[in-house]
Amino acid sequence: MARVANLTIRKWGNNLAVRIPASIARSANFTEGQPVELSVHEMGVMVKPVGTPKLTLAEKLALFDPAKHGGEVMATGLVGKEVF
């Protein structure tokens, strides 16, 4: 089922803006920092995600799960001529 929100276009500096409600953003799998493409069609405007959001180091570290990733970068030991 499609989610619908009735919104109002507002001025933001020299541009116009519409806020995407959290429930709509979740349904569209939008996240803060998500790159999107805005295009004009005969029936209106389409916003669609392109690529993946750029995460900060803190966000990347927060996503790290030691149980899933083995807790170590090189859990198998030395592979080549590494010197430690």
Image (cartoon, rainbow, N blue to C red):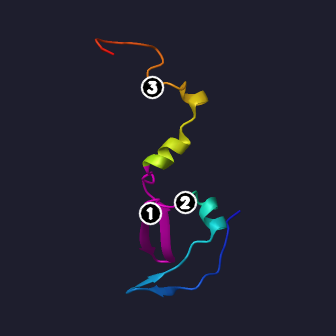
Could you say which is closer to the camera, residue 45 or residue 60?
60
Give residue 4's position: percent from left, percent from top.
66, 73
Give residue 74's position: percent from left, percent from top.
44, 21
Dot label at residue 68: none
Could you say which is closer to the camera, residue 1 or residue 59?
59
Q: Magenta includes 42?
A: yes
Specify which label sits upstream in the sequence, 1 or 3: 1
Q: Amino acid at mark 2?
A: Phe
Q: Vertically, is 69 above or below 80?
A: below
Q: What SS does tag 2 mark?
A: loop
Q: Are marks 2 and 3 in contact (CB under 8 Å)?
A: no
Which residue matches tag 3?
73
The residue at the point 65 percent across, 76 percent down is: 5
Q: Vertically, is 82 above or below 14?
A: above
Q: Amino acid at mark 3?
A: Val
CA separation in Å, label 1 and label 3: 33 Å
Q: Residues within 10 Å of mark 3 (few under 14, many from 20)?
A: few
Res 65 quadrant in image:
top right
Q: Are marks 2 and 1 in contact (CB under 8 Å)?
A: yes
Task: Farthest residue to the right: give it.
Answer: 1
CA separation in Å, label 2 and label 3: 30 Å
Which residue matches tag 1?
36
Which residue matches tag 2?
30
The C terminus lies in quadrant: top left
Q: Nearer the viewer, mark 1 or mark 3?
A: 3
Query: In the rendered structure, which segment of residues is drawn in magenta?
Result: 30-56
